[in-house]
Image (spheres, helix red, strand yellow):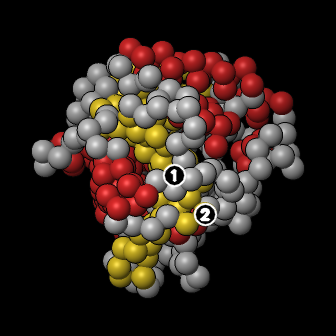
């Protein structure tokens, strides 16, 4: 990849080679002192270089979920083929951005992520002035991004964002009703005194279905994305539940939204073939129920046999997910 010197001058930042190899670069964003007391925090923005013969008429900003980081080069290629410059963000304490001694993915308030999201959007807009930006977010990122967009809209700062694609967004707490009542109240109280306490939760099969060491076809860093996932802390879950409550009161992200989800949920602590053809993490009925709280124009597409990350599904459901995104992008004039 050749570095665009005009872009470097325009943004005033330095891009260095990324772990994804040729064609990818990263920029480390120092964010200052951690509000939660775990030292200095940073986020890392990764860009896929615009290659010879590719045109740019838009841009994509991707936000990962919990126990995750940006590694989905197939997704980046998909958007690039449709005229969108692609950027993936590793949030503070996640993936490339996590520093020694920091609790993976821990924040006490999801609004803390506004700092790196705002800065990333500024860098994308400076590198590609005047083009529409599509925000793509997965799972917990699919909660973080709508909350962020709603705040930007209320502040009159929505531009240049023109669309939102949510991949199995986490819009409510799965499990029995007690989880959304007494357990949530207990978490709220405990988070004030022991925010870093890890919850004892059952292990699932999701990581096994994704990685090449299991039934998946994807290679990723299992230190940054453990197959069993990172521990869920009380303070972080409380932040998520507060985010859920805000979403349930109704947001307005201000742009058209596409919500992709599996057509079914399957929970099990032991792998079976069903694990590869269902969302083994979230309750898809909750996604269907709460998608209407995004405001503006929302399109919901159930993808038959999709995994929790629909873009890491088996070949047939993955193709169906990409086809749905392609049609939606073209309908909203966001694809070249």
Q: Report the Cα–Cα distance between label 1 and label 2.
A: 10 Å
At x 73%, y 49%, the residue is 207
At x 42%, y 17%, the residue is 330
Q: In this view, does 170 lie to the left or right of 256?
A: right
Compared with residue 17, is residue 166 higher up or lower down, i.e. above or below? above
Residue 17, numbered label: 2
Compared with residue 148, is residue 335 higher up or lower down, i.e. above or below? above
Image location of residue 238, percent across then percent down: 40, 61
Q: Which of 11 and 106 is in front in this view?
A: 11
Quarter of the figure with residue 332: top left
Q: Which of 186 and 302 is in front in this view?
A: 302
Image location of residue 257, percent across then percent down: 36, 28
Q: Nearer the viewer, residue 209 or 223?
A: 223
Query: Can the viewer see residue 36 in this picture?
Result: no
Image location of residue 162, percent across then percent down: 30, 32
Secondary structure beneath dot 2 equals strand
Kindly indicate whether the residue at mark 2 contacts the one at mark 1 (C-beta within 8 angstroms). no
Q: Alpha-carbon neighbours of circle 1 within 10 Å: few (<14), some, or many (≥20)?
A: many
Compared with residue 108, is residue 87 higher up or lower down, i.e. above or below? above
Mark with earlier residue (1, 2): 2
Residue underneath mark 1: 47
Q: Alpha-carbon neighbours of circle 2 within 10 Å: few (<14), some, or many (≥20)?
A: some
Compared with residue 170, is residue 90 higher up or lower down, i.e. above or below? below
At x 75%, y 28%, the residue is 314
Image location of residue 268, percent across then percent down: 74, 41
Secondary structure beneath dot 1 equals strand
At x 43%, y 45%, the residue is 61
């Amino acid at each position: 990849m050749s570095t665009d010197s005009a872009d470097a001058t325009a943004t005033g930042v330095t891009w260095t080679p990324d772990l994804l190899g040729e064609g990818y670069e990263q920029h480390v964003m120092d964010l200052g002192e951690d509000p939660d007391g775990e030292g200095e925090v940073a986020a890392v923005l990764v860009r896929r270089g615009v290659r010879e013969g590719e045109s740019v008429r838009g841009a994509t900003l991707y936000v990962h979920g919990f126990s995750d980081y940006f590694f989905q080069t197939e997704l980046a290629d998909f958007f690039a083929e449709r005229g969108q410059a692609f950027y993936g963000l590793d949030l503070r304490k996640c993936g490339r951005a996590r520093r020694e001694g920091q609790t993976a993915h821990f924040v006490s308030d999801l609004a803390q992520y506004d700092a790196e999201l705002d800065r990333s959007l500024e860098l994308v807009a400076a590198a590609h002035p005047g083009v529409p930006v599509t925000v793509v977010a997965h799972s917990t990122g699919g909660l973080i991004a709508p909350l962020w967009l709603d705040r930007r809209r209320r502040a009159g700062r929505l531009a240049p964002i023109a669309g939102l694609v949510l991949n199995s967004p986490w819009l409510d707490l799965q499990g029995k009703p007690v989880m959304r009542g007494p357990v949530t109240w207990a978490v709220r109280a405990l988070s004030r005194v022991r925010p870093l306490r890890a919850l004892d939760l059952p292990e699932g099969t999701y990581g096994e279905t994704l990685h090449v060491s299991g039934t998946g076809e994807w290679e990723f860093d299992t230190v940054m994305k453990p197959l069993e996932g990172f521990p869920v802390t009380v303070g972080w879950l409380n932040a998520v539940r507060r985010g859920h409550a805000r979403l349930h009161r109704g947001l307005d992200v201000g742009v058209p939204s596409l919500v992709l989800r599996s057509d079914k949920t399957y929970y099990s602590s032991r792998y079976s073939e069903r694990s590869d053809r269902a969302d083994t993490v979230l309750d898809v009925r909750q996604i269907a129920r709460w998608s209407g709280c995004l405001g503006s124009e929302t399109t919901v597409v159930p993808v038959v046999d999709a995994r929790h990350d629909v873009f890491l599904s088996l070949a047939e459901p993955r193709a169906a997910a990409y086809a749905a995104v392609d049609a939606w992008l073209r309908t909203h004039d966001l694809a070249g």
